[in-house]
Amino acid sequence: MLSRLKHWRARLLLLLAVIGPGFITANVDNDAGGIFTYSQAGAQFGYSLLWTMIPITIALIVVQEMASRLGAVTGKGLSDLIREEFGFRLTFIVMVTLIVTNFGNVVAEFAGIASSLELFGLSRYVVVPVAAFVVWLLVVRGTYASIEKIFLTASAFYVTYIIAGLIAHPDWKAAAFATVTRPEAAGIRNYGYIYMVIALVGTTIAPWMQFYLQASIVEKGITARQYAASRWDVILGCIFTDVVAWFIIVACAATLYANGHHDIGSAADAAQALRPLAGEYAYLLFAAGLFNASLFAASILPISTAYAVCEGLGFESGLDKKFREAPVFYWLYTVIIVLGAAVLLVPGLPLVYVSVLSQVANGIVLPLVLVFMLMLTNDRELMGTYTNSRRFNAIAWTTVVVMVLLTLLMLVTHR
Amino acid sequence: MSLVALSELLGAPVRGATGAVLGRVREIAIAPQDHPTRIAYLIVRTADGERVLPSAVLKSCGATVRTADDGSAWEKYSASDGVLLLKRDLLDQQIIDVHGRKVVRVNDVELDSTPVNSHVVLSVVAVDVGARGAIRRLTKGIVPSFTLRTLLARIPPRVIPWAYVDLLETDPARRVKLKIVYEGLSKLHPADIANIVEDLPHAEREAVFETLDEEVAAEALEELDPKVQVSIVESLDSDRAADIVGEMDPDAAADLLGELPEGRSGEILNEMEPAERQEVAQLLEFGEHTAAGRMTTEFVAVGDHGIVDDAIEALRQFEGSREAVATVYLYNVAFKIVGAVPLVKIAISPATTPLSQLAEPAVTCTADTPDDDVAALFDKYNLVTLAVLDEHERLAGIITADDVITMLRHRR
């Protein structure tokens, strides 16, 4: 009896220990940049961008699965592997690119914090410096781990979008049809349309998430043997993310787009999407959710960037080290936060525009990171029997090619 | 003698006796079986495939490599497990810096070329883990080499002498061929070894624990986070795991086996020496978060009629951990515990002093005392060891202060 109980407990613990990284990463994915991008996509184009959700979900699953498989099989982070297999110079280039794009994402998170609290009438010139300091302290003091659960619980807020979408009485037939239909050919010549497609891909399959996910898998100590359970964690996380994304677009399309409100200038506009659900309190609900999501991601992004860069370039890293022992690590972390917050203090900065722009940058950089991941996951010496299947390669390479083509198209159509 | 960096040599043109370019350097090999630091040969990419340039014909090594022959006698290169290839196995890889007691990444390798008679002897002297190697790698071929040299000379070097480098190799067969034994690592304090191991990927962790001396491995394992302990032991062969677990303190061993899946801990127990097995199996029976789960069954106890000399003799015979000898326990004819003598008192008293004169009342608890109460007893009485009694008031084991500190830290 006792042994049976113990066996059962062990299995449950194994499941709990493995379930996590994929789901957490998925939740962090719906950050300020994500919410603004999905909202803008719905407001600007109605249902007509919904067709992107299925291909994006498939690509997201493939990419995240590759990242977690790399972590489980090698026990190393993505930047470690890039360094070991491709040498110093390429690593340096990737790391500089990562710092720049991640910096854009940090700015977007602070924009999320600023605009959510502005709905309560708080000035961003007060809120942002305080938030930056809080984020810095949370992580350096090591209190982050204990409040991660609070963030996670609070991210149940995303469900409100699903409910809002349901209550908004969208044209279900049109929405469903738009999801499975082929995109209109006219979109290819439309700069704004392509820009938004890149932003959607970039916010959903963000480059930094791959570094973060792989690092979490390694830190959890998940090995190739326990990998099967982890794969489900990743897949479910991806699907959850994109279901929420779909509902955000639908909610915004049914409320904002339907009422001729085609451009989201501020968080106050975006909050209108929740009106069917919460009425006058829509902004309250929206602000609380956006604030939580932004603070959550703002706590993760700078530190995960600092880890990835220092590991790749061979600097000492880790919060268990003293400042003196790991100066580059702490400086990088601090500078990203301080500068990221400082950008928000520029008077008249268009917050939503900046947030969406940072997601476009994600989309442009994605193929670079993906190519490295593809070469690593196909390296037999590194992965043994865990190399990519042909189908995975086809999907991931298609993603690379499509993103490069979209970027070129965007440049061509830009006037 | 002069120093040359690996990154300068890689890709450098190789010129023969006539001055003609024969090829470019692709790899540099050490054969640890023959010499631990000296370069055995260079692999040169020539028009006729990859060729082995033996170090005996090297005339000079720098931005250009010169040889005494014309390359016609160089053999075709074929891969061999028994050589260390500096670019593939060392550059950009992680190594253990034994002196600095941490895991670092190699930015470049410094080689020394010393003229001996008519040729030069090339050998590895250090690995560069600092900014100098990094900037050299980054700017190579972009900035003119003269400018680069003056620039680099200003950057203070951060190098680890080759003698303090322990390589990481996950393939056991190759480890033997390359003579990797973690000699430097095994001399460190177990806590430092544990720190280093925690920074390694799992395959490298296993490699270290497969190679280290059992006793060192056991002590290092005890210092590791329980989760890491489990993952390492799960990855080792049962008999290797049993060897290491057998060397651990019985209480630590029992805690570890308690965390393993039942089948696995059974296998390991079966492989252990009978005496060790019994002790550990007994401890495994108790609840983990009670005094019995925390205690070790290795302690020093002598009869209450004894003198200081008897206690010293018992200490001499004792094979358990150092922490456990802090207190010598006294038992009466019925084997009940009647007192405790701190080690200090034994050390400063004449050899013939009766132990009963030195004894203090023993602070004790029972096998089922929960963790919190154990910690409270240590706090209240400022204990170094606490006696755990069985139902007959006999000494079942003792808990040492270090176990309590570990327990409190893990609960945070």
Image (cartoon, coloured by chain):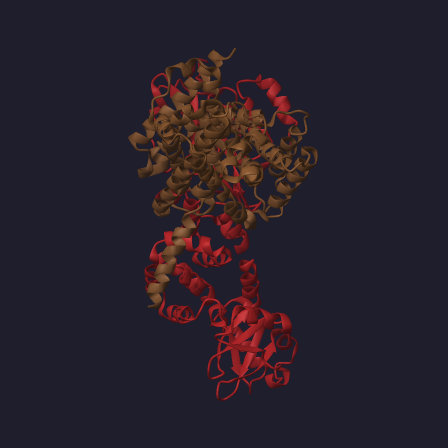
Chain colours: A brown, B red
As drawn, which residue projects farthest toward the right?
Answer: A126
Q: Could you say which is closer to the camera, residue B155 or residue B265?
A: B265
Q: Could you say which is closer to the camera, residue B402 or residue B41?
A: B402
As drawn, which residue projects farthest toward the left?
Answer: A390
Give the position of the N terminus of chain A as an image quadrant.
Answer: bottom left
Residue A294 in view (yes/no): no
Which residue is painted at 55% across and 71% down in the image?
Answer: B374
* Depicted B243 relative to depicted B98: above or below: below
Which residue is painted at 29% across and 30% down in the image?
Answer: A390
Q: Total of numbered circles in the picture?
A: 0
Residue B339: image x %, image y %?
58, 82
Residue A409: image x %, image y %?
44, 15
Residue B323: image x %, image y %?
55, 67
**In the figure, residue B360 lies in which quadrant?**
bottom right
Residue A21 in view (yes/no): yes
Left or right: B269 in relation to B353: left
Residue A362: image x %, image y %?
50, 27
* Depicted A264 relative to depicted B199: above or below: above
Q: Could you say which is closer to the camera, residue B100 or residue B350?
A: B100
Left or right: A254 in relation to A227: right
Which residue is painted at 47% across and 69% down in the image?
Answer: B293
* Depicted B241 relative to depicted A325: above or below: below
**In the figure, residue B356 lies in which quadrant?**
bottom right
**In the figure, residue A321 lies in which quadrant?**
top right
Q: Could you say which is closer to the camera, residue A147 or residue A316?
A: A147
